[in-house]
Structure formats: structure tokens, C-alpha cells
Image: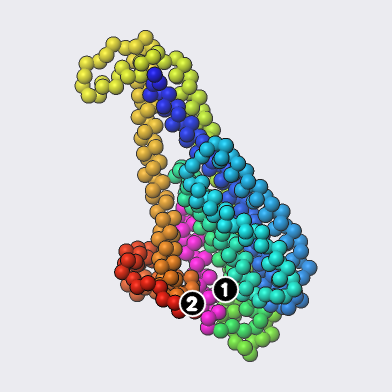
Amino acid sequence: MKSGLHFLIAARQCEIDELDQLARTSELVGVIGRLVHGLQRERGMSNVFLASRGSRFADQRDPQIAECLALEQEVRNGFDQLETETRQRASAGNSARLFSRIAWVLPGLDALPALRRRIGVLELGPAQSTAAFAKLIVGLLAVVFEAADGATDPEISRLLVAMFNFMQGKEFAGQERAFGAATLALGRSNEAQRVQWLHLIESQERCFHVFTDFSSEDVLALWRESESSATMAELERLRRVGTTLTAADAPYSQLSQNWFDCCTRRIDAMRTVEDRLAADLRALCGRKTAQARTELEAYRQLLGTLAPQSGGAMFFDDAGTQAVAPAPYGRVLERSVLDMVQEQSQRLQAMSDELETVRASLNERKVVERAKGLLMAHRRLSEDEAHKMLRQTAMNQKRRLVDVAESMLAMADYLPLPDARPPR
């Protein structure tokens, strides 16, 4: 018959298996970050290329595409390795949702060559190109989100939440680069474009706010250092120009290049923060796993010295019962086993409590996304329109966005069925 220490060892081994899974997933998150960065740059170049009718960035596109193809292969290899190792270990956890996200992303990667050919022959407009790249990048970020949502260690989860929100904020910055480059290249904008530009700015700020809540002081110091005052001043100046363009302002094509270069300096600086987050994540997973393996080995050594059934001798001492005669290896050893069991239980409970706090940020995002989906279905709105409606309602009622979203979902059963009107 197995003792309690046997099961304590089994519990620790399960933790190590989960940490190994998190380490593999964290490596994949880092590779995805590099691919997203490459695709963001390619998207910006493609937008200027399309807006200028092929006169600009024609030579730079091919090297950028080659870089993205190499990174894409790394991501595909990471997907394959994660699936193989998870299946071999029969791991469960968050794998089902994570693999579903990966399954959705792969057709997008398969479709990239066709998208690039259409851009090369000027078959698409800048807005269509932006939307296509954004759809794929959002899918890749969803893989990162599921990795963060499935993390079982609170410290690792905090880092993943910080990294996901930073990557998402950086993606909105990339969308702004592409959107602004095309708008300035065309030399005109309208009210809808101005609102879209402001929405991209606000979305960045929202993501970076969550990132700061979950980051270490060292990472935040690097983030502040990366935000060059000269670059940010130039960015704000060009934002003001871009959001006030009229048809009479046609000769603004040079500003398009200035805008692209300014945004690229900012986004490349963000890459240093993203790399630091990825490195911290790998290092943390390594430390956690090494510590768990050391403790597991100590448990196994103790198991080899423990007399059969000795671990229960001290169990009822705290209940005031008369002490049982010590086992051959002494009361100290018996107490050490019970202390380890109690310490393990308390540690796991503390981890669970902290993990719930960390996941609150992710759960809020899920609630908002579900409320947006509800509005899109029942009001026939676009995603941007649904988000703006939620945000405006929250402002009018002086409530948090997530609280408005929760109230809307609570009333879902009372909403009429979606009508057949086409979306606007």
C-alpha cells in the first residue's frame, strides 16, 4: 500500500509536467512574437506599396517576405513539436482550446502566398491588405492568449498576461502605422478615417495600461527608456496632420515615408521590450522547473529512508490525542513528511488564489468579447461599431466597460432574435 509521500511525489511530478508544458508553450510564444513583428512590418510596407501604386517599397518587400517565411517555418515547427510532445505525455489542461486556435491560424498561413501575389499585382487596396494581415495576426495573438489563459503557475501567468497585452498593443501600433502610411500617401482623409485612427490610438493605450499592471519594475524601466521623447513628439505631430487632412492637402506623400519611419522606430523599440519579456518568461520557467525537480529528488530520497506506515504516527497530535510511540526512524522524520504535505497543500492553495487574481484580466477580455459578439449578431454591427457602443455606454453610465458587458450578457435571453438586415 502506498503512503502519503508517494502521492506527494506524484503531485510534484504533475507540477513538473505542467511546468514543462508551460516552458514549451512559452518558447512558442516567443517565436510567434517574432513572426508577428515581421508580418507587421510587411503589412506596413505593403500598404505604402499599394497606396503609391507600386512606386515605393517595391524592392524592400521581397527581403521582408523572405524573413517572414523563415519565421513562419519556425512557428509551424513549434506547433508540430507542441502537438507531438503533448500527445506523448497525454497532457490535457488548456490544450484543446490552444490547439483549436492553432487549427484556425494554419489556413491563414497557408493563404499568405496568394495574398502576397495579389498585393504584388496591385489587385488589393490598402484597407483590404490591412484587414487581411490583421486577421492573421489576431489569430496568432489568440494563440498567445490561450497560452496565458492556460498557465497554472501565477508568476508565469502574470508574465504571459503582460506579454499578451504588450503584443496586442504593439499590433494596434502596427495597424496604426499601416493605416497612417496609406492615409498620408493618398493625401486625404474623412471623418470615418479620423475616428478609426483615434480608435487605434485608444486601443494601444488600453493594452499598454494592462501591460504596466502586470509587469516588473525592470521591464517597465526598459519600456520607458524605449519610448524616445523625440520619436513620440514626431509621432504626435504626424498624428495631428493625418487626422486633419483634406482633399486639398494632396502633396503629402513624403509625410507618408516620414510617418512610416517614425512608427517603425517606435515599433522596433517595442521589440526590445517584447524580447525581454520572452527572455524573462523562459528564465522563470527554467527556475521553476529546476526548483521543482530538486524538491522532487528530496522527496524521493526521504521515501527511501522512511519506515512503512511511519508517516501517520503524528497525524492526530494536533487533535490532543495521546502521542503514539515513535517509529524506528523517529518523530522528526514523521513530522517532516506531514509538514511537507501541509506545506504543499498551502502552497498550491496560495498559487490557486493568486492565479484567480491574475486571470481576472483575461476573463474581463472574454466578457467584453462575448458582449461585442452579442451586439454584432443582434444589431448587425461591425466589431468596431460594437466596441464603440459598449465604450460609449460605459462612459455615459460612468461604469467600467466590463460591468456594462456583463449587464448586457445577463439580458441576452430577453433580446429579440437577430434580423436579416445586412451589416453596415
Q: Amino acid at mark 2?
A: Pro
Looking at the image, which is closer to me, 267 or 36? 36
Q: Residue at x 22, y 16 (%)?
A: 322
Residue 205 lies in the magenta-colored region: yes
Residue 69 vs 78, above or below: the answer is below
Q: Residue at x 54, y 36 (%)?
A: 89
Find residue 236 and name its label: 1
> Which image quarter is the N terminus in?
top left
Q: Nearer the viewer, mark 1 or mark 2?
A: 2
Estimate the x, y position of residue 366 in percent, counting from the top left: 43, 59
Estimate the x, y position of residue 149 in percent, counting from the top left: 47, 50
Determine whether, in the image, residue 88 is placed left or right of residue 420.
right
Number of marks present in the image shown: 2
Task: From the image, give the main secondary structure of the stretch colored magenta.
Answer: helix
Instruction: Write down the region rendered in magenta.
Output: 191-214
Find residue 423 and name its label: 2
Q: Amino acid at mark 1?
A: Glu
Residue found farthest to the bottom: 248
Q: Residue at x 62, y 66 (%)?
A: 133
- Whether residue 265 is visible here, answered yes or no, is no
